[in-house]
Image: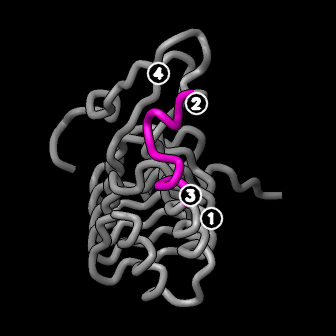
């Protein structure tokens, strides 16, 4: 993580004209041919049988992919702005996880980089929103929605993702929940 700013401070806002929602103007934001190309590469990266091949497809999308990155089956990078994703060395993105670098809203769309730190792990089915940085050796539990940065070494879970307790807290709470008969 580079600084103490929040994801909202790192997101770029792009106003759209008129009263229609911003998704109606997606062709002004990105070339339809580029999106079609990205879509094919995303699909191939999701189903490729080897990690080496998945990493190759991710790099063709413009994603920065470090050494030893593991990209799970069915995991999905952003199709509009994949070039805003950085996967640092030995990061793991689990099965069916999604890394989003854009949000289409009513009057604007937003874009932001997503950085997955060294040896960080993103669990199966987790969603990471634009502008979020996952610190080195941080862990995101399966099916979590990551709406804010995760500090290095932290474990988060839930919707929205929140820090998990320490091992000592977990032991105390499990002892307190045991009822002797």
Q: Closer to the N terminus: mark 3 or mark 2?
A: 2
- Nearest-to-viewer mark from 1 and 2: 2
Q: Are marks 1 and 2 in contact (CB under 8 Å)?
A: no
Looking at the picture, does residue 7 appear above or below residue 135? Answer: above
Q: Closer to the N terminus: mark 3 or mark 1?
A: 3
- Nearest-to-viewer mark from 3 and 2: 3
Residue on which disc 2 sits? 23
Q: Are marks 3 and 2 in contact (CB under 8 Å)?
A: no
Q: CA distance from mark 3 to mark 4?
A: 22 Å
Q: Going by the image, does 95 lie left or right of 65?
A: right
Residue on which disc 3 sits? 36
Q: Looking at the magenta stretch, what is its main secondary structure? A: helix
Q: Closer to the N terminus: mark 4 or mark 1?
A: 1
Please identify the quadrant where the C terminus is shown. bottom right
The circle on residue 96 is: 1
Q: Which residues are magenta?
A: 25-36
């Amino acid at each position: 993580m580079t600084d103490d700013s929040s994801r909202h401070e790192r997101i770029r806002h792009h106003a759209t004209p008129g009263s229609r929602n911003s998704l109606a103007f997606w062709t002004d934001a990105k070339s339809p041919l580029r999106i079609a190309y990205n879509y094919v590469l995303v699909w191939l990266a999701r189903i490729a049988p080897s990690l080496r091949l998945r990493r190759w497809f991710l790099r063709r999308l413009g994603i920065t992919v470090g050494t030893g990155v593991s990209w799970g089956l069915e995991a999905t990078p952003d199709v509009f702005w994949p070039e805003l994703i950085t996967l640092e060395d030995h990061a793991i993105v689990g099965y069916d996880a999604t890394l989003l670098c854009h949000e289409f809203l009513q009057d604007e769309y937003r874009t932001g980089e997503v950085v997955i730190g060294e040896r960080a792990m993103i669990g199966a089915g987790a969603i990471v929103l634009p502008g979020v940085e996952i610190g080195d050796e941080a862990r995101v539990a399966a099916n979590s929605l990551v709406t804010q940065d995760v500090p290095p070494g932290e474990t988060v879970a839930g919707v929205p993702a929140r820090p998990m307790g320490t091992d000592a807290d977990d032991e105390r709470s499990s002892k307190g929940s045991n009822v002797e008969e």
